[in-house]
Amino acid sequence: MTHPALVATLLDGPVMRRGSGSWLVDIEGNRYLDCVAGPGVHVLGHGHPAVISAIERQASELVHSSFQLNEPVIELAQELTKLAGGSFQRVFFANSGSEAIETAVKLAKKFQAARGRFGHSIAALENGYHGRSGIALALTGMNVYKTGLPGFSLYPGIVHLPVPRTGVVDLDELGRQLDARSQDDLLAVVAEPVLGVGGVIVPPDGFLRALRELCDARNALLIFDEIFTGLGRTGTTFAFERSGVRPDILVVGKPLGAGLPVGAVLTPDDLGSCWAPVDHSTTFGGNGALVGAVGKAVLGELTAGGLADASERAGNQLMDALRSAAPPDVEVRGQGLLIGLEWQSPAQAMAFRRQMMARGVLVGIGGQHRSVVRLTPPLNITAEDLKLLESTTLAVFDEVVRR
């Protein structure tokens, strides 16, 4: 949907008026099962009572406190570090996922410089997605988002490593791939445990471990971008948990704000403390009392409701059903309720999306060639709505193939 008052950057679609649970209603009264959810933002669905209550209560007391701390932000930081566990002890809050990624890279460079390492090399992944601003766009390994922006493809020091789809991961080969792209000192690797926007690519077992070992061998920091995959989306609280590999820096966002803009960078004490006061700040970073209150509500519901486990069960059920009925040339893959359907062409994927919308189900599109349909419903989607998503998808499979 475009409008003369807005810059036309969105795909076609209805204008929404309200939402409840897994459903959206447009200005003409049509209902849609929202299997985009933000994308990936509304893990609790729309209008969740705990979120609404937190907004109303906090908005009546304090929304923003400039450069002064406030209780909701402190409490959210404590809850996040407790949830992430391990050595994570400090949090910097940002205004978006992209901003949080750039903060993480800035922190990594600051930390390495304090150790006498002043190189430029930061490795990311081909088909990885980290945002569309500055360094975040440069880290993004998808040329589809860099059309007409050659400077972002050649940002100094940033290189992209291939992600194997199957097979055994060879650490030596990974090192050779890096050396072929950069002779500079490696400072950090930035990676999504599952590549969401890039096409729901699930790296083979051992890949994240190989990244960890590569970083350890070269005294580099491992940064996991869990903006999309974190907080239950992939069937565990954080996607890295499946591999047993822990990052040095963890970045989260999207679902933490339940629709309000937020990003967060979690670090051990030695990394976080390398910043002196006012070394880094943003207008809305680390002081949004409203976001702090909402974030606490989201984490509370995530834990109390067992939503990571619910995502795992629902995702496995849905993927089993879709794999059994998908056309031979459509690959179904994912973890939890981060599910991708890869078609042979972008035209087929777009046709699938349009037919789903015509039947009242909203789905996303991603991948380097925009040929992957993405299903990311709320984690608390009801059994009835999950069945509707399944039956509609199977019906549209047939419709698109017949065309």
Image (cartoon, helix red, strand yellow):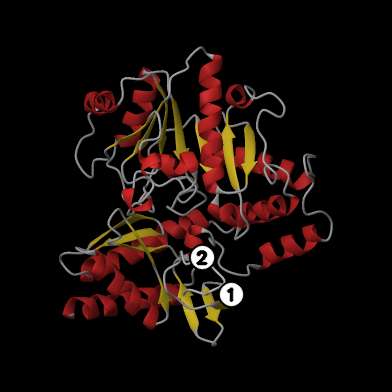
**In the depicted structure, whether residue 98 falls above or below residue 118:** below
Amino acid type at image mark 2: Val
Residue 306's mark? none
Left or right of 32: which side holds 203? left
x then y, percent, for residue 280: 65, 32
Task: Name which of mark 1 and mark 2 comes first in the sequence.
Answer: 2
Find disc 1 in the rendering and name its residue. Answer: 20
Q: Residue furthest left?
A: 328
Q: Secondary structure at mark 2?
A: loop
Query: Is 348 in front, or is 325?
Result: 348
How many angstroms separate mark 1 from mark 2 (CA)? 28 Å
Q: Determine if residue 378 is in view.
A: no
Give the image quarter of residue 28.
bottom right
> Quick one: SS at disc 1?
strand
Question: Mark 1: which amino acid?
Answer: Ser
Determine whether, in the image, residue 94 is placed left or right of residue 361: right
Residue that label 2 marks? 7
Name the quadrant containing residue 172: top left
Please tell me how crowded label 2 is: few (under 14), some (14-19), or many (20+) other residues with Cα within 10 Å: few
The percent position of residue 270, horizontal first and vertical second, equals 60, 21
